[in-house]
Every structure is written in C-alpha cells, then in structure tokens.
Amino acid sequence: MTTRAQVDTLSKAQRQAVTLAQREMRQLWESIGNLSPEWQRDLLLDEVPALARKYGDIAATAAAEWYEQTRAQSVGGTYEALTADSFSDEAVQASIRYKAGSLFGDDPSALSGFLAASLQRWVMYSGRQTIARNAEHDPMHPRYARVPTGARTCAFCGMLASRGFVYYTESSAGGDFHKYHNECDCQVVPEWDGKTSHITGYDPDALYSQYLQAREGLGGNPDVTAILANIRRLFPNDYTDGVKTAS
Ligand SMILES: [Zn+2]
C-alpha cells in the first residue's frame, strides 16, 4: 500500500527539480535584462523550452525511481519504470509568445513571474506523466489517484481527487484528470492494494460527499463550473479558493 510518507518523498523530489529550474530561470532572466525586448523574447523562446526539458527529465527520472521503489515495497519483484517525455517545446513557446507583450510594456517583470509559475507546471508534468504511464503499463495493474499534497487544495483539484483510486488508461484519464494549474501540488499516486486509500489526510470519500452535496444542492443537471462554484460557497474553509462572505 502507498503511504503518505511515500507520497511526501515523491513530492519532495518533484519540488527539488522545480526549485532548480526556477533558480536557473532567474539567472537567465537576469542575464537578458539589458537586451532589447525582441532579443529577450527570442532568447526566452530558445532557452525556456530547454529548461523545461532539462528539469522535466530530472523530475521524470526521480518519479521513475520512486515508482520502482514504491512498487517493490508494495508488491515486491522488480519492474523497470519508463520515463515520460517532457512538456512539448511548442507548447512552452506558445505560452511565451502569448505573454511576451509584457516585455514591450511597462511591466516586463510580469513575464518573469509567469514563467517561474509555468515552469513549475511544466517540470511537474514530466513527473506526473511518468507515474501515470507506468501505472498504465505495469503488469500488476495499480489504480491511481490524484492526491493533493499541500495544506489545502482548490475546489477543482478537490473534485478530481474525490474520484479516489481508479483504473485509468490514456483515454479514460482524459478530460480534466491531467489538467493542472500553476502552483498545483497534486501528485499522481499509484496504489497496488485494493481500492482504499491508506494515505493520511487524503479522504476521497469525504471530498466526494462534498461534491455530491454541491451538485444536489443545485438541482437539475448543473455543469462542472456551477458545481465548483457551489463547492466554494458551501465549504469556504476547506478550499484555497473558497468564497468567504463577510458576516
Ligand atoms: Zn492541485
């Protein structure tokens, strides 16, 4: 069975890769400070995808090692984990182009903040994909879940985490499951042992009952956006984006 301590180990390794990536991003940013906006943009288009790749590969390697160790502790035997590809260069470049206008405006540093936050998601992508791909290829067929790791979680991640441990395939995990916002600390976590969660602090049943309450409270057939808004209203203190009303 997979424990909170194991999830913390995975989470820590992923965070380390992100920290190193963001440090190198800051150095890159400082090194281009005196160049023209056009030069800055072109250099970022070259260099940032390389950073996402370099540290994504580190995150993927750490996730693959973690998968092997955790699997050995759960079911014994050996298994050679694969590493997933890094976030695509084209997608990274599209994000940079989309935000590059701020280099030409009053607040170029807005782009720096955006890149640091996005780099977190791009690097984490490689680790999460590595776990998901292995869970799908592993002959022992673990289920996997999206497990929050921070003190509190947004309603969107809570909803996905409420599904608990499920068999996913590349297609069935489609839709929202592999969508992550910047700064999201959720991990993809495999479980080889039954359907129950043994991870302290992760209670998918409780999350799911909040989801149902929010859905049923609306009546009819509400869409996900409406359900999430209702979760934020009904349980303002349980979610980072809960709606606090003045009383
Ligand atoms: Zn999350």
Image (cartoon, grey):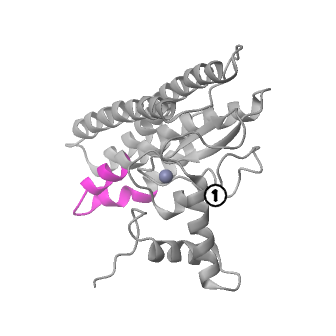
Q: Which residue is mark 1?
A: 176
The N terminus is located in which quarter? top right
In the displayed orientation, state which residue is furthest to the left.
34
Label 1 SS: loop
Magenta span includes 166 = no
Q: Position of residue 2 (x, y in %)?
A: 59, 32
Name above or below for residue 87 compared with residue 67.
below
Magenta span includes 104 = yes
Residue that appears at 57% across and 78% down: 226
Q: Position of residue 188 (x, y in %)?
A: 58, 41
Q: Position of residue 15 (x, y in %)?
A: 40, 35
In the displayed orientation, state which residue is furthest to the top.
78
Residue that appears at 39% across and 62% down: 240
Name above or below for residue 180 compared with residue 89.
below
Q: Nearer the viewer, residue 205 or 110?
A: 205
Name above or below for residue 124 compared with residue 62.
below
* Relative to 5, 208 lies left or right: right
* Relative to 154, 91 lies left or right: right
The quarter of the displayed image where residue 105 is located: bottom left
Q: Which residues are magenta?
A: 98-115
